[in-house]
Image (cartoon, helix red, strand yellow):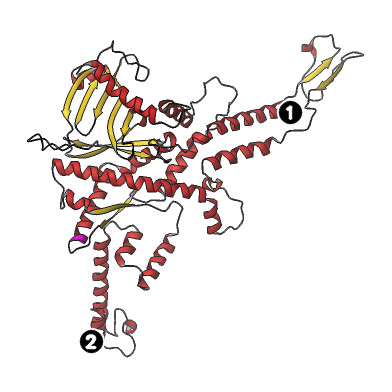
Amino acid sequence: MPAIERDLAYNRILAFENAMCRRFDKPRMQRYREARDYYSGENLPADNVAQPLRINYIQSIANKHTAYLFGEYDDDVLGWRCDPLQANDSSKVLAEKITAWCYQKCRQNDANQLFPIMGIDGSVCGDSFVRARWDEIEQRVCWESIAPEYVHCRWNATNMARIEELVISYPMHRDDALAEFGTSGNTSWNRSAFASPMLGMAIYWEEWNPMIYRVYIDDVQVRDDVNPTARKATSPLDFRPGLIPLVHFPNFEAAHEFYGYSDVDSAFALQDELNRKLADEGDTINAYAHPITVINRYFGDLEELPVGPDQVWNLGREGEAKLLTWGGPAPEVHKYIEIIREIMLETASVSPVAYGRHKGTQQSAIALAIEMLPLTERVRRKRAIWASRLRQLLQMTAFIEDRNQGLDGFTYKDFIAHFIRPLWAPPLPRDRLALVNENIALHSGGLRTIERVNEDIGEERPSEKAQQIKEELKELSDMGIKVGGGSGFGSSSLPEGADKETMKGTAK
């Protein structure tokens, strides 16, 4: 393939992104860079004196949003529930096998570490991406978080969840490229379409669509294959396109926008203003602690004037000294700073309660929940987006695994006949005892099954646990019948007027 066509593959996607983008103030890469600089606190030069305190609310806000997204979980960051689309005799067994498989994939790929990293990417940049690839060494599907800066997409114009073409591009050291691909690239290649070239670095980029998979180092092609998930053709009519093994998680979606919105970009200027005004207030305090002295009509050497408390200066007959002070009304600095801070947190949908602050009164749990409502509303919206993309990721993983080694205990056809949903931990702390008592009351009233109770309190295999509970209850009942009114459970184990035969029937 000529080099110009390879350039066009990348440029075509960039041109598509620019044409479809409805945010014209800054290019996507510039937005990402600015957001990461604010998150890391490197948005200003080291010698900037206007904001010496370098207060970083942006990092705190992004971390808070990510923490509330996943909630107060204990062991696994996400639980899973699988429901058959059509119930039948074998559906419960299959559902439990698929649920166990979902837990297994998350644990194999260290989801407790992977998903929060993606959450931070999304909160800061507005987007996160995860790739599913088959690993020949580990013989399983691996999930990899890809930095959003490295991903460029051409999506379906009417279904933005469907990616039609993809380029993943990032810098790679030439020595590593030579060791892995047998070429160090082309040092004279024109990379004007890419990010600024770095000395000693090549550009690795791979191109995906439903039919092809190609890899390049600069303009040197090192791989040209059929998409590994496509069905290989035995005849011209037998070829079936594959999938692009990457899932996009937009942080917060707007109508008809592919790339998501950050949680923090609206707070950048407000944080800058907060930093500047606190620096100004610090200067004011410093001026009062170390005031400027104005001396008039003194013709001696200023160094001869002693400095310190209770010192007396002889300025001559006409000399005078006074402190330089503010002559007008004092500005309401504290009030202005508090207004800026409140606007910044409200813009980012974060309540002061999220930082452990409240008014000190005996507020009810409902009142505190209302104060947290802006944050929990955004959490619900994010979770709806994540649930959809997580199903897509698991379905993609099942498809790739089924193509390479087969699924254990079920088929891909079985998998797509079930609806997978993530079970999220509550975003706000909950009283564990109150949760258990609530489920006991619902079960006792016949409003909730044992299986559903186990799901709600976080059991991984609810049906197995329910069966175990039933067996233990039967065993205890049998033990009560055996010991009668003597030892063991005592005489109160049988109701008054009941005999053993009656209780046997009840136990059954």
Nearer to me, 117 or 2: 2
Secondary structure, mark 1, is: helix
Is residue 180 shown above or below 137?
Answer: above
Taking the image as shown, residue 196 lies to the left or right of residue 345, namely left
Q: Residue furthest left?
A: 234
Secondary structure, mark 2, is: helix
Mark 2 is surrounded, within 10 Å at the Cα level, by few (under 14), some (14 to 19) or many (20 or more) other residues, namely: few
Label located before the other in sequence (2 or 1): 1
Nearer to me, 93 or 466: 93
Quarter placement of the C terminus = bottom left
Residue for point 13% across, 38% down: 231
Quarter placement of the N terminus = top left
Q: Magenta region, mostly helix, strand or loop?
A: loop
Give the residues in magenta. Answer: 85-92
Is residue 336 shown above or below 87?
Answer: above
- Where is residue 474? Give x, y as percent: 24, 74
Residue at mark 1: 288
Q: For residue 170, say whether it is visible.
A: no
Q: Is residue 399 magenta?
A: no
Q: Residue furthest bottom?
A: 497
Q: For residue 263, say whether it is visible.
A: yes
Nearer to me, 323 or 33: 33
Which numbered circle lies on residue 501? Answer: 2
Q: Amino acid at mark 1?
A: Tyr
- Where is residue 426? Give x, y as percent: 42, 53
Taking the image as shown, residue 293 lies to the left or right of residue 267, namely right
Nearer to me, 366 or 254: 254
- Where is residue 164? Give x, y as percent: 27, 34
Q: Amino acid at mark 2?
A: Glu
The Cα atoms of the two marked residues, 2 and 1, are separated by: 92 Å
Taking the image as shown, residue 367 lies to the left or right of residue 163, namely right
